[in-house]
Image (spheres, rainbow, N blue to C red):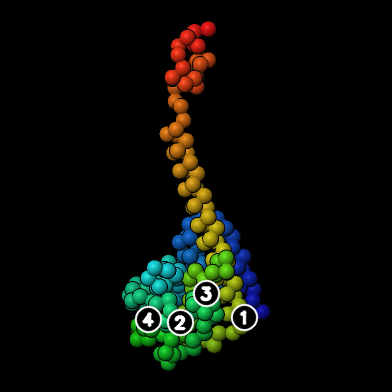
């Protein structure tokens, strides 16, 4: 029951925090820090899929060293395939699982177990959320369900930020276009807007 209360508190605080975000990276940072704390894990990372390179690009992490973060590219079609198969992946021993692409780096970092869940937005897989533990951990159904819920919230928040930034950019473009095309004059006259090609005789009445 205690773990359920902790998870509930995390969801409440997480949704409150990211509801005020306007940048996807900020959402990722808050998510990584919240998950690490709630699970009392060694670390947490948030990845997004780069469709051009077919790799998972790190967006944010918490609790992991710079050396481990820079260990090498993470391939979307290989390694842990939670971001491809849209299914959670729980690994009890990272040193004894062929899905781990960098087992020696994981050992050096002090990682024993790993949980990976897909980040989904609008029925599309956009990334992955991963939780790392220092001690061997048998992830329960409650752990996995909570990680999936957080990943969904993260995905929706990122999509909202993306739409917000797109909307803001569109508004700026429209403002710039209107500024260039609008008629500017320091003095208003009753004949403003009359085409220049019209003879002065019409304006002399």
CA neighbours of label 2 inside 10 A, class few (<14), some (14 to 19), many (20+):
many
Distance between the Cα atoms at labels 2 and 3?
Answer: 11 Å
Instruction: Identify the disc placed on residue 109.
Output: 4
- Image quarter where the N terminus lies is bottom right
Nearer to us in this view, 132 or 119: 119
Residue 13 horizontal side relative to residue 195, left or right:
right
Cα gap from disc 2 to disc 1, whole angstroms: 21 Å
Q: Nearer the viewer, residue 131 or 98?
A: 98
The label on residue 142 is 1
- Dot 1 falls on a residue whose secondary structure is helix
Instruction: Find the distance from the CA under tag 4 to the CA under tag 2.
Output: 18 Å
Q: Residue at x 48, y 57 (%)?
A: 23
Q: Earlier in the sequence, mark 1 or mark 4?
A: 4
> Residue 28 at x, y = what percent?
48, 65
- In this figure, which residue is indicated by the disc labeled 3? 118
User: In the rendered structure, which disc, 2 or 1, sits on the residue that comes first in sequence?
Assistant: 2
């Amino acid at each position: 029951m205690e773990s359920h209360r902790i998870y509930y508190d995390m969801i409440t605080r997480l949704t409150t925090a990211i509801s005020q975000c306007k940048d996807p990276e900020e959402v990722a940072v808050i998510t990584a820090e919240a998950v690490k704390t709630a699970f009392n894990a060694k670390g947490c990372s948030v990845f997004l899929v780069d469709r051009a390179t077919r790799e998972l690009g790190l967006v944010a992490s918490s609790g992991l060293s710079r050396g481990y973060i820079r260990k090498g590219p993470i391939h979307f079609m290989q390694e842990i395939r939670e971001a491809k198969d849209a299914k959670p992946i729980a690994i009890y021993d990272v040193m004894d699982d062929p899905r781990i692409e960098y087992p020696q780096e994981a050992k050096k970092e002090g990682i024993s177990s790993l949980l990976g869940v897909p980040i989904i937005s609008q029925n599309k897989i956009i990334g992955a959320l991963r939780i790392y533990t220092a001690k061997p951990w048998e992830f329960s159904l409650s752990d996995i369900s909570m990680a999936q819920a957080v990943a969904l919230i993260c995905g929706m928040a990122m999509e909202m930020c993306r739409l917000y930034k797109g909307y803001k950019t569109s508004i700026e473009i429209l403002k710039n276009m209107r500024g260039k095309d609008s008629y500017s004059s320091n003095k208003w006259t009753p004949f403003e807007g009359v085409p220049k090609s019209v003879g002065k005789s019409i304006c002399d009445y």
